Image (tube, grey):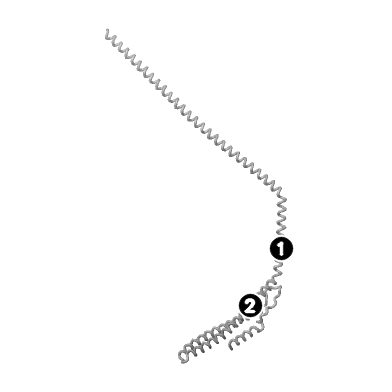
């Protein structure tokens, strides 16, 4: 218990030292929180570190006492079995162990309460710092909001001017669009006419080619027929010539026979 009282006394001394007070320092609204004096921030950090170190030291001491208490209880349990009044010895050892454990528990609860209180204070300090930061930045936020509002209004005016200009230019745009549509329609009409002429000319060329091919075939057939007639006429003429020649040869043979007969009659 003396260790606990001593630890609490050291903690109180640390908290009440100058420069380690928990009261938040006033903040100049015109500056950022980060602009506080370096020596003040350093002192606060050192105080926090010292406080955390003290909490850690006290926790280690409690853990050590708990281990020692459990060890002593185990040793006494072992020693009791060598004595005559074993149960009485065990009860005394258990009672001593429980009393020590209860003392440690009380000190542990006190330490936990102190740490919770310190964490709550730290949260309050951080909240206060954030609020101070927020308040310090209020003029800049207001200026930004005003600038944003001005930019928005300027944009709205520009949009209104652009809309008015578009409205004023609408008839001209409509006329330009109509002229463009008419030009496109004329171009499409000429394109369709050119395609139609191309199709008609292609058909006409095909028809001419077919007629030319037909004439060529007819001329070839006519030539073949003429050649056939000519060959037939030549054949007939040759036959006539052969017949005439044969008739002439027969006549000459008959005359020769007559002459021979006449000579034999004499």
Say few, some or many: other residues with alpha carbon within 10 Å of mark 2 (under 14 / 14 to 19 / 20 or more): few
Q: Is residue 117 left or right of residue 215?
A: right
Residue 165 at x, y percent in the picture: 72, 52
Mark 1: secondary structure = helix
Q: Nearer the viewer, residue 147 or 258?
A: 147
Q: Is residue 97 left or right of residue 12?
A: left
Residue 214 at x, y percent in the picture: 49, 31
Q: Is residue 199 visible?
A: yes
Q: Nearer the viewer, residue 112 or 243?
A: 112
Q: Which residue is mark 2?
A: 120
Residue 129 at x, y percent in the picture: 67, 75
Count the marks: how many?
A: 2
Q: Quadrant of residue 14?
A: bottom right
Find residue 63 and name its label: none
Q: Which residue is mark 1?
A: 149
Instruction: Name the residue rendered at 70%, 65% in the picture.
Output: 145
* In this view, 49 is above or below 176: below
Q: Quadrant of residue 155?
A: bottom right
Mark 2: secondary structure = helix
């Amino acid at each position: 218990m003396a260790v606990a009282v001593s630890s609490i006394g050291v903690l109180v001394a640390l908290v009440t030292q100058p420069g380690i007070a928990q009261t938040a320092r006033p903040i100049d609204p015109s500056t950022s929180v980060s602009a506080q004096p370096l020596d003040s921030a350093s002192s606060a950090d050192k105080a926090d570190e010292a406080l955390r170190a003290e909490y850690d030291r006290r926790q280690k001491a409690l853990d050590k006492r708990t281990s020692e208490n459990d060890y002593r209880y185990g040793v006494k349990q072992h020693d009791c079995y060598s004595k005559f009044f074993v149960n009485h010895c065990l009860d005394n050892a258990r009672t001593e162990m429980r009393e020590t454990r209860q003392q440690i528990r009380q000190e542990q609860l006190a330490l936990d309460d102190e740490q919770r209180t310190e964490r709550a204070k730290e949260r309050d300090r951080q909240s206060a710092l954030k609020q101070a930061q927020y308040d310090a930045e209020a003029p800049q936020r207001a200026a930004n909001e005003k600038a944003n509002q001005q930019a928005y209004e300027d944009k709205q005016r520009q949009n209104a001017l652009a809309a008015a200009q578009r409205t004023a230019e609408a008839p001209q745009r409509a006329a330009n669009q109509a002229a463009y549509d008419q030009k496109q329609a004329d171009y499409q009409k000429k394109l369709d006419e050119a395609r139609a002429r191309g199709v008609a000319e292609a058909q006409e060329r095909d028809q001419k080619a077919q007629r030319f091919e037909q004439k060529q075939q007819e001329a070839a057939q006519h030539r073949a027929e003429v050649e056939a007639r000519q060959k037939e006429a030549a054949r007939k003429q040759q036959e006539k010539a052969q017949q005439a020649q044969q008739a002439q040869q027969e006549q000459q043979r008959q005359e020769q026979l007559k002459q021979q007969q006449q000579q034999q009659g004499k």
